[in-house]
Image (tube, helix red, strand yellow):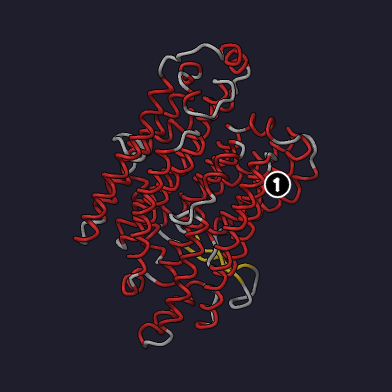
């Protein structure tokens, strides 16, 4: 077995080891150095794995230990998984570096090491959701993910974050419970936990017409559970408070990465457990398509009414999650390709918006209301550019990252007349709504402020401006534009990965 096949396991393991050892370091700088080393190691292993698998044009399964199923466990890696792991490590690094000043201010010094502990376990759980080939192992890491996500929301330790965390925890537990019920039913029917083994049993049961209702019920429970956890409309009520009130690094990672881990697991279940053909015959994709369209529209409507800048960005995430689910709901190869590409786009764009908003908030004397942020981009130009680029990307302006997935969503809908009409109408309406709340915000941020009452606070904010924040925003701007211009290799990698996933 080539040594590179060990890298998915090593990526998960090093993050878990980091989570165990981090609390023993009390010095904040040492903790950050250890975390950086872990992220660089995961990035390097993911890059090597991606290059190797793309060159060979193959995927592989990795048996954990010496015991086969049902006692053993398996990981599975292909080009798509390696690409996602690579992106997750990059975005988490940029989010933590860009939000470092907020971490140092918002979180007590005695809790910083625990915060990075949660971040290490959070990354390990997301990597496990990407790589696992065992559906019960996926549930275990869903629970780890939930605990860590709630912890990084509550790390800011103010009244709003405590309330938001409780709401987040209750909704997450509800989603986890539905998913576990679905897994339990599926195991009772098939007798397997490995995805490939379950697929063989499911195909046989569908062919013979046995256990059709329990199969559909188990699938519905798993889809419902993951939809709740990924904030698909109308299961999104926990998201704005959790993302809007937490420290900036947490908001960026929760919106950009955590939500996507559950969607990636859902795509794997669709391909490796039930297959796209079975899903289409059961009309599951039609339900997902409708919910995705509703999310695209209603998330933007909620954002349009919001005056708190971070909550506006959070509601925008609900709309963008709708885009991803609509692509999955199309049930076509191009639609799912567009959904996977939009996962990458959102992973780079939404952290940039949160980091840029943080820079603008600091430049305005820590004001969060849109009116108070008028003229803030003039005081922090790079943050203003970052927010502008992110806004244009979310609207879907050509040459920015958000344009390509919308084009591919339209292409993916052409195979069905009903889907095509609804998709094009939803894309047009959602893009218009995106423009109606992002463009006025951008104009206000670049406009000349009407008052100079906060001049002293602005000077103070300028003197403390974070170089790390500006560097992270700069890298994310470049990444966003690169995704908008050079998207063909990424789409080819996604296509290859999906072909090998089935």
Between 420 and 190, which is closer to the camera in this rendering?
420
Which residue is depicted at the point 46% across and 43% down?
Answer: 315
Total numbered labels: 1
Q: Name the residue under label 1.
A: 117
Which residue is depicted at the point 76% across and 48% down?
Answer: 21
Q: Where residue 83 appears, x then y in whole percent? A: 46, 50
33 vs 408: above or below: above
Q: Where residue 12 appears, x then y in whole percent? A: 62, 55
Q: Where residue 450 appears, x then y in whole percent? A: 45, 14
Q: Is residue 250 left or right of residue 328?
A: right
Indicate the quadrant containing the N terminus: top left, top right, bottom left or bottom right: bottom right
Between 134 and 6, which is closer to the camera in this rendering?
134
Which residue is depicted at the point 46% across and 67% down?
Answer: 269
Q: In this view, does 411 lie to the left or right of 84?
A: left
Q: Is residue 258 left or right of residue 35?
A: left
Which residue is depicted at the point 41% across and 72% down?
Answer: 274
Between 471 and 350, which is closer to the camera in this rendering?
350
Q: Residues within 10 Å of mark 1 (few under 14, many from 20)?
A: many
Q: What element carries label 1?
A: helix
501 vs 259: above or below: below
Q: Outermost residue toward the left?
A: 417
Between 352 and 474, which is closer to the camera in this rendering?
352
Tell me if I can see residue 134 in this picture.
no
Indicate the quadrant containing the C terminus: top left, top right, bottom left or bottom right: bottom left
Rendered image quadrant of residue 3:
bottom right
397 vs 265: above or below: above
Q: Where residue 237 appears, x then y in whole percent? A: 51, 51
Tell me if I can see residue 342 in this picture.
yes
């Amino acid at each position: 077995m080539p040594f590179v096949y060990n890298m998915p396991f090593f990526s998960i393991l090093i993050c878990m080891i980091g989570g165990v050892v981090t609390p023993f370091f009390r010095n904040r700088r040492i903790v950050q150095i250890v975390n950086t080393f872990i992220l660089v190691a995961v990035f390097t292993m993911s890059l090597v794995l991606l290059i190797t698998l793309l060159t060979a044009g193959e995927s592989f399964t990795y048996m954990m230990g010496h015991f086969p199923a049902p006692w053993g466990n398996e990981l599975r890696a292909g080009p798509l998984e390696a690409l996602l792991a690579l992106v997750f490590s990059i975005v988490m690094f940029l989010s933590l570096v860009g939000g470092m000043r907020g971490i140092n201010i918002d979180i007590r010094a005695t809790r910083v090491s625990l915060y990075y502990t949660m971040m290490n376990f959070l990354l390990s759980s997301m990597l496990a959701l990407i790589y696992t080939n065992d559906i019960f192992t996926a549930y275990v890491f869903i629970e780890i993910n939930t605990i860590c996500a709630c912890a990084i929301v509550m790390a800011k330790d103010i009244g709003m974050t405590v309330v938001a965390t409780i709401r987040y925890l209750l909704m997450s537990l509800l989603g986890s419970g539905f998913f576990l019920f679905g897994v339990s039913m599926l195991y009772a029917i098939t007798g397997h936990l490995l995805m490939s083994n379950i697929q063989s049993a499911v195909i046989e049961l569908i062919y013979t017409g046995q256990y059709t209702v329990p199969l559909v019920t188990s699938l519905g429970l798993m889809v419902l559970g993951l939809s709740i956890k990924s904030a698909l409309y109308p299961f999104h009520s926990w998201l704005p408070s959790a993302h809007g009130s937490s420290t900036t690094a947490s908001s960026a990672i929760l919106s950009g990465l955590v939500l996507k881990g559950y969607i990636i697991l859902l795509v794997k279940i669709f391909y490796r457990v039930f297959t796209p053909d079975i899903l289409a015959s059961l009309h599951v994709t039609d339900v997902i398509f409708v919910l995705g369209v509703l999310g695209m529209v209603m998330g933007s409507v909620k954002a349009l009414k919001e005056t708190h800048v971070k909550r506006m960005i959070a509601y925008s995430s609900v709309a963008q999650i709708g885009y991803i689910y609509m692509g999955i709901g199309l049930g076509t190869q191009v639609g799912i390709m567009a959904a996977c590409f939009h996962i990458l786009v959102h992973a780079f764009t939404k952290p940039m918006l949160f980091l840029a908003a943080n820079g603008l908030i600091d430049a305005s004397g820590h004001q969060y209301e849109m009116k108070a942020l008028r003229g803030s981009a003039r005081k922090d130009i790079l943050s203003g550019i970052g927010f502008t680029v992110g806004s244009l990307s979310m609207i879907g302006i050509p040459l920015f990252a958000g344009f390509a997935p919308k084009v591919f969503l339209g292409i993916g809908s052409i195979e069905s007349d009903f889907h095509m009409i609804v998709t094009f109408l939803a894309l047009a309406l959602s893009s218009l709504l995106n423009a109606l709340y992002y463009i006025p915000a951008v104009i206000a941020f670049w406009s000349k402020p009407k008052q100079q009452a906060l001049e002293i606070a602005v000077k103070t904010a300028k003197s403390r401006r974070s170089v790390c924040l500006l560097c992270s925003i700069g890298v994310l701007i470049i990444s966003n534009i690169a995704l908008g211009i050079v998207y063909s290799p990424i789409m080819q990698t996604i296509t290859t990965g999906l072909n090998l996933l089935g």
